[in-house]
Amino acid sequence: MSSPTCSAAIKPLHLRNEPLRLGLYFALALFSIILLGLTAARINYTLGLAVGFYDPIVVELLVSSIIAIIWSFFIMHIIHTIRVGGPVTTFRHESIGFIIIWIMFLVGAAIATNFWANLSVCFGTFTCDILTAIVAFSWLNFITLTLIGIFSMLFLAGNSGYGSMDEPLHGRWGSGRKLLFELSFTDSPPRWHFCPLNTLQRFLYESIVLLECMPS
């Protein structure tokens, strides 16, 4: 007699990440505020020297920080208040602003790192400590922005992909995906039947179903 077929239906997975995105945008705002203070201190220091000057890349990072602060608090407001109307309220709008700021921090951090590559020789002095902190927080902002982009793409991938680019960026409309999964114990090797999902989702769903379908 053949073994009975184990069938399981998994409830929809709601791929909502508003708290995570809010946290990342808050971190971006915090790091940008710190970077703003560091770059302002560096500009004030160099302009106060006998031969006053300023570093163009420091000015670029200062401008990037100001834009990132404004952008972060604006996006946090949109997500928190669930705004659906007005300018810059869709994922497409967010992606445009995100790419601009992401490129600004990538360029600024890369140039600053290359320009001040040997700061370890003067570590402990006021000048080097500020420059080291500027480079560090430039990369922290870039990494935070990259994480924001990754989680936004994961959310969109789980909710109709590119077709969701014009949906509100607050993300509370996400319905997730539903997977119908069937495992037949009579086959050798077992045969799997499921609707198309990305690799990570398939792995998670298959793991859950295997646990539910294991014979007692």
Image: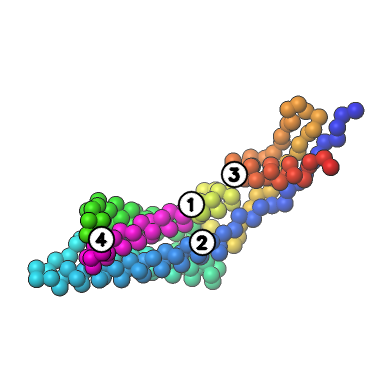
**Quick one: label 3, few (<14), some, or many (20+) residues within 10 Å?**
few
Picture quadrant where residue 69 is located? bottom left
N-term mark: 4 or 1: 4
Q: Is residue 57 visible?
A: no
Range of residues picked out in magenta:
124-150
Three-letter residue code for mark 1: Ile
Question: Hey, what amino acid is under mark 2?
Answer: Arg
Task: Using a 10 Å C-alpha cutoff, classify the residue at mark 4 as few (fewer than 14 neighbours), some (14 to 19) or many (20 or more).
Answer: some
From the top left corner, tell me how far across and down residue 36 is, in percent.
31, 69
Q: Which residue is mark 4?
A: 123
Q: Which residue is depicted at the point 78% across and 34% down?
A: 184
Residue 155 makes an appearance in the image:
yes
Label of residue 115 in the image: none
Report the residue marked by disc 1: 150
Q: CA distance from mark 4 to mark 2?
A: 35 Å
Closer to the chain start, of discs 4 and 3, is 4
What residue sits 50% from the left and 65% below the top? 23
Q: Label 2 vs label 1: CA separation?
A: 10 Å
Disc 2: which residue: 21
Please say if the residues under marks 4 and 3 sit with CB atoms less than 8 Å apart: no
The verdict on residue 143 being magenta is: yes
Q: Residues within 10 Å of mark 2 (few under 14, many from 20)?
A: many
Label 2's element? helix
Name the amino acid, label 4: Phe
| Label 1: which secondary element | helix
